[in-house]
Image: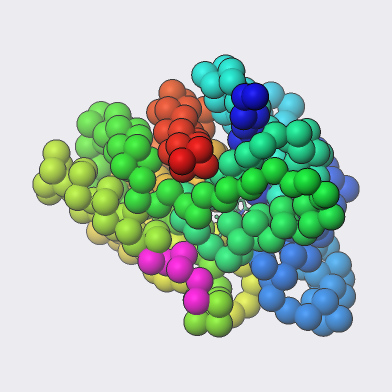
């Protein structure tokens, strides 16, 4: 009998429409998760629904409307394309896409894979964090707890230092910087609250530093004079987040009249945090502060580089599962 194998690609989730109602639903589900915001619901829920969402809703809706792509959120569009392309390359596997928050739901995707012998879970977070990767793993464990004959489920921890990932990023970066010739290459990652690093031993920062170090080594071989720096973006709420902050560093670089290329290695596909926060807001901030030239280097999205990366990641998991 042949072994039926499934691959589950998981991403964060995104609003189903660029409307206040859909965005409220999305933010509500996402920010209620204690992996993301670690405050007791009795305290947090009134703040979330009474202050945070109402304050954020108007401007964030406009931001989503600006980046909307083919009548959907870019995060969903690129994730769907990617899963379809992987399925095309690997016809013997059943490839499913799910979002941890919203649609397509994890529950439905897992049910479609229920008949498989093995399921390989790849969360589209190159750098492990308790706020993202662990949230996915714990949700899958909860959803499959009552299954009578569950498939063997393997979880990829992350791929921060995977040679195929690093090579894909380096190729993507090289394509842009050989034309743009920036003074500085900025690697900007989504931040997390500092408190999570100590409290949960979250290894996210170490994983981001490893990715940056490997990119730096490879890029500086070809561009020895290029200054490569690492920053954190997308700060949310009060409290201390990982530093240095992308916007603060861009303002300083602008004062020195530098040209800068920014890329976001922690985002597998482009989304509101890259397309709006970096390519629109931070571009404006940099140029208005006196900067010379700003280039945004897109995420790997549904490129051949990213499809090849997913093939390499699934192949290595499947070899392990079958050994
Ligand atoms: C405490 C709040 C948040 C933590 C912790 C956090 C961690 C985290 N997030 C990503 C990846 C993405 N985040 C995205 C959007 C987003 N993130 C937060 C808050 C936290 N993220 C909010 C409130 C939002 C929504 C947008 C906004 O209101 O600013 C997205 C994009 C989703 C989209 O629809 O395009 C991604 C992707 C990582 C990798 C991470 C920790 C490592
Ligand atoms: Fe986030
Ligand atoms: Fe943001």
Q: Quadrant of ligand 1?
A: bottom right
Which segment is the magenta one? 201-206
Q: Please state if 320 lies on the left or on the right of 148 as rendered.
A: left
Residue 236 occupies which quadrant of the picture?
Answer: bottom right
User: Where is 3 relative to 182, above or below?
Assistant: above
Q: Position of residue 255 (x, y in %)?
A: 30, 60
The residue at 84%/55% (across/down) is 146
Taking the view exactly as shown, the residue that stands out farthest to the front is 1
Whether residue 276 is visible here, answered yes or no, is no
Q: Position of residue 213 (x, y in %)?
A: 26, 56
Relative to 305, residue 277 above or below: below
Q: Compared with residue 63, is residue 199 higher up or lower down, i.e. above or below?
A: below
204 falls in the magenta region = yes
Residue at x-position 67% and y-position 68%? 35
State which quarter of the image contains the N terminus. Answer: top right
Taking depth in this image into account, of 98 and 26 the one nearest to the observer is: 98
Q: Is residue 316 left or right of residue 114?
A: left
Q: Is residue 180 above or below residue 51?
A: above
Q: Position of residue 90 (x, y in %)?
A: 54, 21
Q: Nearer the viewer, residue 9 or 314?
A: 314
The image quarter in which residue 70 lies: top right
Task: Say if the magenta span includes residue 86.
Answer: no
Q: Position of residue 7 (x, y in %)?
A: 61, 35
Which residue is at 63% across, 47% downward?
153
For this view, does 91 lie left or right of residue 186? right
């Amino acid at each position: 009998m042949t072994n039926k194998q499934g691959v589950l690609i998981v991403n964060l989730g995104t609003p189903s429409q660029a409307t206040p109602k859909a965005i409220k639903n999305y933010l509500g589900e996402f920010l209620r998760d204690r992996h993301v915001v670690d405050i007791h619901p009795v305290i947090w829920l009134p703040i979330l629904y009474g202050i945070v969402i109402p304050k954020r809703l108007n401007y964030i809706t406009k931001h989503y409307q600006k980046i909307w792509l083919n009548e959907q959120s870019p995060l969903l569009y690129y994730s769907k394309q990617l899963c379809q392309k992987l399925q095309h390359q690997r016809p013997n596997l059943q490839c499913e896409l799910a979002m941890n928050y919203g649609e397509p739901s994890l529950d439905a995707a897992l049910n479609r894979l229920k008949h498989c012998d093995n399921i390989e879970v790849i969360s589209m977070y190159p750098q492990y964090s308790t706020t993202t990767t662990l949230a996915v793993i714990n949700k899958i464990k909860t959803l499959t707890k009552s299954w009578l004959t569950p498939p063997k489920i393997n979880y990829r921890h992350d791929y921060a230092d995977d040679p195929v990932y690093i090579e894909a990023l380096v190729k993507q970066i090289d394509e842009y910087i050989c034309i743009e010739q920036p003074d500085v290459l900025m690697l900007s990652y989504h931040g997390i609250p500092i408190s999570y690093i100590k409290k949960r031993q979250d290894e996210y920062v170490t994983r981001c530093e490893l990715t940056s170090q490997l990119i730096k080594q490879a890029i500086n071989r070809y561009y020895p004079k290029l200054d490569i720096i690492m920053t954190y973006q997308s700060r949310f709420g009060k409290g201390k987040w990982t530093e240095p902050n992308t916007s603060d560093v861009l303002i300083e670089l602008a004062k020195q009249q530098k040209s800068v290329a920014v890329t976001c290695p922690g985002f597998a596909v482009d989304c509101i945090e890259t397309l709006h926060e970096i390519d629109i807001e931070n571009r404006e901030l940099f140029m208005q502060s006196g900067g010379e030239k700003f280039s945004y280097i897109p995420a790997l999205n549904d490129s051949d580089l990213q499809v090849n990366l997913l093939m390499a990641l699934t192949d290595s998991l499947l070899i392990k599962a079958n050994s």
